[in-house]
Image: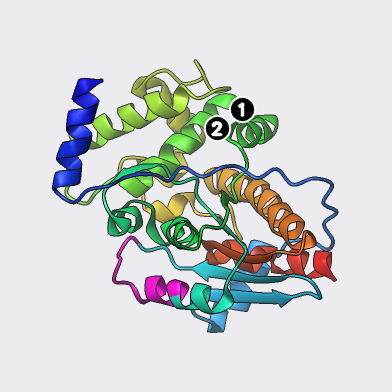
Amino acid sequence: MKKIVVLLIAFSAVGCHFRFSKLDYYQPVDVDLKSTFRTMAEHDSLMADKEWPYILKVGGSNSSLIYYGSWHTNNPDNPQIAEIEKIWKEFKPTVGVTENRLGFIIGSEESDIKSYGEFAMAYIMAGRDKIPVYTLEPSWESEAAEMKAKFPTPEVTLFYTMRVFLSERKSGMSTSEIEDLATHLLKKRGSRAGLEGSLNSLDEMDALWQKHYSDLGDWRIIKGSAIHPSANPTRLSRMANFANEVRDLHAAKVIVDLMNQGNRVFAIAGGSHVVKQEPVIRASLE
């Protein structure tokens, strides 16, 4: 205990702050969604002549929404960060929600953004205004259960491993560094509830990849876009499409439920989520 106190004092002395920014889940109740989500093909057609961010504004008789559809950034100086702050202050929300679950941070508000991108702004601004803030994500257990009902468990483990791997892999990494990163992430993802024992080593992942995904090339060097949702999905991006469907369904229910309670909701998510959810949110609030 004394060591912890000493560390807290030391970090405070150099201007660091402990920030417990892991967000609470919000469980919507009895939300009846109308209409259907845009498909990826409809999304691509709509955005063919538009640029990010995509900002959805919906006003009801007793509630309102600003849904900021961002282009992901971890740069505190990116114009989106200042824009989110400006719009938030003008809108004066009563509740904030965001994609991403965030996590534990030691550092400043700038550190939050560097770690969690524009999503950290919901936590930062809600903290300043002393209003509630929630994640738009479903619980890990419910998301994993939906994925396992649709795809074989080892492939679900591979998907979640690759999703993080492709975002954390850096240019210039050696083969051994790449494999060390993949091994670490596989162990971490493969130990999550519901996925335990489904994929136990890099050799097993290699074998599974060769069996089902070899048409994409070597997983060590494929482009990050290989795992993005797509209008013409591969076996891998088909899982990404479905994972986003699960997340979009939950996010839309959260937003509609909060608005049904008369809130002014400021939401932040990757722009594609906002584009896909828009017709459902509009129809469900009419």
Magenta stretch holds residue 13: no
Q: Which residues are magenta?
A: 74-85
Q: Residue furthest top?
A: 197
**Seen in the image, is 96 located left or right of residue 59?**
left
Residue at x 63%, y 37% (from the top left corner): 143
From the image, which quarter does the N terminus lie in? Answer: top left
The reply to whether residue 224 is in sight is: yes
Name the residue beneath numbered marker 1: 152
Most distant residue in the bottom direction: 49
Mark 1 belongs to which amino acid? Pro
Q: Tag 2: residue type?
A: Val
The answer to whether the residue labelled 1 contacts the one labelled 2, judged by CB atoms less than 8 Å apart, is yes
Mark 2: few, some, or many residues within 10 Å (few <14, many ≥20)? many
- The colouring scheme, among rainbow, by chain, secondary structure or one colour, is rainbow
Which numbered circle lies on residue 156?
2
- In the rendered image, residue 60, in percent from the top left (x then y), is placed at 78, 74
On the image, the x and y values in percent for residue 286 come to: 85, 71
281 horizontally vs 209: left or right: right
